[in-house]
Amino acid sequence: MSNFQIIKTKNELDRLLQDFLKKRDEGFVFRGHADFSWELKPKLFRDSEVVKSWESYGLSKKHIAENWIENKNTFITLSYIFGSQNLTKTNYKSALIPYKDQIIPLARLLWFYVDIMKYNYNLYKYINENKSYYEEEYLKQITVRSLDDWISYDTFLRLLEEILYLVERRDVYTNNLLNNPEIFEDIAAYDETRPQHYDMATSALDWTYNPFIALFFACGSLANANSSRAIVIYPSTQISLFLYKQISTGDNVSVILKKPSETIVNDRAKRQEGVFTWMPKARSFYLTKGNYPKLEDYRELINKEFILEEYRIEINDETATYIQEKLKERNINDKTMGLEERVLSGCLDACQ
């Protein structure tokens, strides 16, 4: 973020955290970053996760391109959707879909559907491997589809039917718009809350109701070090603490704040006093702009839909010692946060 306040001393940090405790009672939540240059971007939307998602999917990008994207049945389906437009292997990459006042490249949309399938394949697989944490009724609902459905060409073809709702239909005589083009914004077909806390990249972003827990995740290795001089996290000597408050709610907001489901066993969420933000318009953002959103992309909505503030804390002997003392005093450590099986190294992957 471009606007932030720098905290340099122990006393300044103490005053900040006391102020955070008051703001917690006003509905604010908190998040910590070990490197101030990190963006407020869900892990699923980060470039580094693209390679990982292909590795776990089992089908290669080459296979998808040759057998799904450029399959003759794909072009038959698309040509039907677009009417008179004859789409082929040689021209589909230049095809554009008018969407309201914007343009969506067809190829981007096709590969987005593949991303949707990869993501839900991994979500389904996670839930299937962790059934004991989910209620029986929920498991019955999700078994309408099987894991194989998410690697099926038939599923890909069914997803293409959504394009019918994206394409503008106009009267041939008056050119008046006959429909209201719409993007279905959902990305996940399954629960994301438990997978998010247990090392899977999701479209959610972790926050906590406890500012000291946010501080812990901003400097995990510092909090567990034997010496205040053991600063080995990232090139930066500043960590960031963010606070967030939802102002507007409703169906049309760009960011929402949501608690973990009470029907799903999530020990880490309870220990970490966790809560999530989602960006419910991420699909249309990506399709029209070509990149997934981060919270900073909605800065024009700050103080309208939500409040977002950043504080950067300089790590020195004084502030490092203070942080260690406060976290010890409040018994905040890897064990109490449900992370005893992990090795802390800078900011924890589990809170990213």
Image (tube, grey):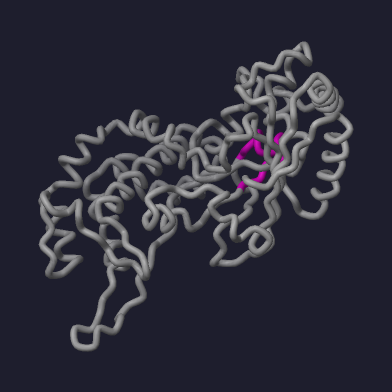
Which of the two residues, 187 or 318, is positioned nearer the viewer here?
318
Task: Give yes or no for residue 315 being in the magenta stretch.
Answer: no
The quadrant in which the N terminus is found is top right
Instruction: Please state if 156 lies on the left or on the right of 43 as rendered.
Output: left
Identify the residue at image location x=51%, y=56%: 280
Residue at point 76% right, 54% down? 27
Q: Is residue 144 above or below residue 96?
A: above
Residue 147 lies left or right of residue 154; in this view the side is right
Please state the horizontal and vertical placement of residue 270, each as a whole percent of the image: 70, 38
The percent coordinates of residue 16 (x first, y second) are 83, 40
Q: Nearer the viewer, residue 5 or 288?
A: 5
Label tally: 0
Q: Position of residue 183 (x, y in %)?
A: 38, 63
Q: Is residue 5 above or below residue 185?
A: above
Going by the picture, which residue comes out furthest to the top? 226
- In the image as oriented, which residue stretches furthest toward the bottom? 174
User: Residue sitting at 56 percent across and 32 percent down?
Assistant: 198
Q: Quadrant of residue 8?
A: top right
Q: Is residue 257 visible?
A: yes
Q: Give residue 167's position: percent from left, percent from top.
A: 28, 68
Q: Please state which of residues 137 and 352 is positioned toward the viewer in this rendering.
A: 352
Q: Quadrant of the C terminus?
A: top right
Q: Note whether 189 is above or below 5 in the view shown.
A: below
Q: Is residue 118 left or right of residue 6?
A: left
* Whether residue 262 can be seen here: no
In which quarter of the view is residue 47 placed? top left
**Horizontal relation, residue 250 to residue 12: left or right:** left
Query: What span is colored magenta in the figure?
Result: 265-276
Q: Is residue 234 above or below residue 305?
A: above
Q: Residue at x 63, y 34 (%)?
A: 36
